[in-house]
Image (tube, grey):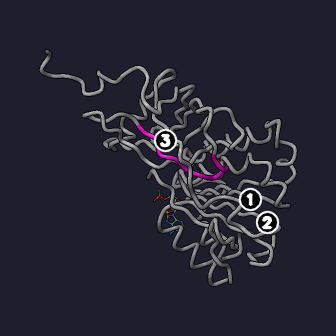
């Protein structure tokens, strides 16, 4: 036996819960997205997350929570990930190629679902970085447009290249045979950077406080009577947004008790 063995060389061609990678796209040196086959019996609600991963040393899988970035009706599953050079999962996951296998555990859960929100007029989806992933699912969900007259996706990142995936989602949304037409009338994307100069700059929290977000979009300031908010980003963003919303009279919703806003941490960061 060879003394220096690759621990992954023994990976069987077909893993338990293994799904086949169909495509991979690298957005910059830190971000990539990929699509895998969908297990036939797998059901989830748009906005939920699952555990995905790769086999680890000794056969124990390395799994992390990932929001599903495709809607419930899509035949494939899409995920959006950061690349952490020494991350236990993403250091290897970033090397996947079409034909490889990724473990997808088929138990979906999460609070960023339409059922957790009371009816309203405008849906705000507030994200930073990879927190855009659950909204990639919800923006292609027909129920989103049945329930809301206006849908706004905000994404804030440090640098311009990190906004490329969100821009592509918007382009694909408008071409979507199921929701493209409705989305063209109802959906708007508002992207900002905080470190690298771009067309629109600033933290979303500051843009809400100053009112610039509403001025730019020609919409009234946040009102718990009309607006519903979903938040997915870094811990700091989530806490600041929670404070900001609660100061304006918004109450947090859950699956069992719908409310005016819901929040979930962007998992892989
Ligand atoms: P900033 O550059 O001002 O920290 P990160 O890469 O650290 O996860 O941050 C992603 C984006 O989220 C950055 O643009 C960052 O802005 C912004 N951000 C981080 N913390 C907060 C917060 N508490 N409120 C609003 N935006 C935040």
Pointer 1 or 2: first along the chain:
2
- Distance from label 1 to label 2 (Cα)? 8 Å
Depth check: give the residue in front, 107 or 1: 107
Name the residue at 42% across, 41% down: 83
Is 142 on the left-hand or right-hand side of 260?
right
The verdict on residue 48 being magenta is: yes
- Residue 36: name its quadrant: top right
- Does 180 sit above or below residue 223? above
- Does 244 sit above or below residue 8? below
Q: Which mark is residue 122?
A: 2
- Distance from label 3 to label 1 (Cα)? 31 Å
Of discs 1 and 2, which sits in the foreground? Answer: 2
Looking at the image, do the residues carrying marks 1 and 2 touch, with CB atoms under 8 Å apart? Answer: yes
Is 189 on the left-hand or right-hand side of 3?
right
Q: Label 3: which residue?
A: 105
Pointer 3 or 1: first along the chain:
3
Please provide the residue range marked out in magenta: 44-53
Q: Label 1: which residue?
A: 152
- Residue 174: name its quadrant: top right
The verdict on residue 59 being magenta is: no
Looking at the image, do the residues carrying marks 2 and 3 touch, with CB atoms under 8 Å apart? Answer: no
- Residue 55: name its quadrant: top left
Residue farthest top in this picture? 1
Q: Secondary structure at mark 2?
A: strand
Q: Secondary structure at mark 3?
A: loop
Depth check: give the residue in front, 172 or 36: 36
Coordinates of residue 103 in the picture (x, y in percent):
45, 35
How many labels sit on residues? Answer: 3
């Amino acid at each position: 036996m060879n003394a220096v063995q690759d621990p992954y060389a023994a990976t069987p061609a077909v893993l338990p819960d293994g799904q086949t990678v169909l495509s991979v796209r690298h957005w910059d040196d830190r971000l990539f997205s990929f699509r895998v086959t969908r297990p036939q019996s797998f059901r989830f609600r748009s906005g939920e997350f699952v555990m995905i991963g790769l086999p680890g040393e000794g056969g124990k899988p390395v799994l992390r929570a990932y929001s599903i970035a495709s809607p419930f009706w899509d035949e494939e599953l899409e995920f959006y990930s950061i690349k952490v050079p020494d991350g236990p999962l993403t250091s290897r996951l970033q090397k996947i190629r079409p034909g490889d296998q990724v473990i997808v555990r088929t138990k979906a859960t999460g609070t960023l679902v339409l059922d957790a929100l009371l009816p309203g007029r405008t849906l705000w989806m507030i994200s930073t970085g990879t927190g855009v992933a659950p909204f990639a699912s919800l923006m292609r969900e027909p129920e989103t447009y049945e329930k809301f007259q206006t849908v706004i996706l905000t994404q804030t990142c440090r640098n311009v290249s990190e906004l490329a995936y969100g821009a592509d989602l918007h382009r694909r949304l408008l071409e979507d045979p199921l929701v493209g037409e409705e989305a063209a009338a109802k959906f708007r994307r508002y992207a900002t950077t905080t470190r690298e100069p771009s067309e629109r700059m600033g933290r979303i929290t500051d843009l809400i406080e100053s009112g610039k977000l509403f001025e730019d979009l020609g919409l009234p300031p946040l009102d718990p009577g009309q607006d519903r908010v979903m938040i997915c980003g870094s811990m700091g963003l989530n806490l600041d947004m929670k404070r900001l919303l609660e100061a304006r009279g918004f109450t947090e919703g859950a699956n069992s008790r719908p409310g005016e806003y819901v929040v979930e941490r962007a998992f892989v960061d």
